[in-house]
Image (spheres, helix red, strand yellow):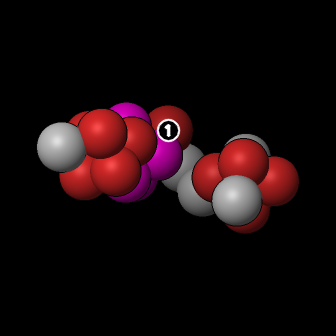
Amino acid sequence: MLFLLERIPQDVQILTVEIITE
């Protein structure tokens, strides 16, 4: 999934990480 995150803008990536770690 990290390879997908690299294609996502930084702001969206941060939100995604926060959701995953929640």
Tag 1, which secondary structure? helix
Q: Residues within 10 Å of mark 1 (few under 14, many from 20)?
A: few
Note whether 20 is above or below 18 in the view shown.
below
Pick the front one: 22 or 13: 22
User: Is 15 displayed left or right of 8 in the figure?
Assistant: left
User: Which image quarter is the N terminus in?
Assistant: bottom right
**Which residue is found at the position 81% from the left and 53% from the top?**
3
Rendered position, 10 above or below 2: above
Residue 15 placement (x, y as % from top left): 29, 47
The answer to whether one can see residue 1 in this image is: yes
Q: Quadrant of the C terminus?
A: top left
Q: Main secondary structure of the magenta part?
A: helix
Q: Residue at x 46, y 46 (%)?
A: 13
- Farthest residue toward the right? 3
The residue stretch that appears in magenta: 11-16
* Residue 15 among those drawn in magenta: yes
Q: Which residue is at the front of the view, 20 or 9?
A: 20
> Could you say where residue 11 lies in the image, as x and y percent from the top left?
37, 42
Q: Nearer the viewer, residue 6 or 22?
A: 22
Work out which residue is located at the far left of the displayed protein and give it.
Answer: 22
Kind of residue at badge 1: Gln
Residue at image x 34%, y 50%?
20
* Magenta stretch: includes residue 13: yes
Residue 11 visible (yes or no): no
Disc 1 marks which residue?
Answer: 10
Specify the quadrant of the image occupied by residue 4.
bottom right
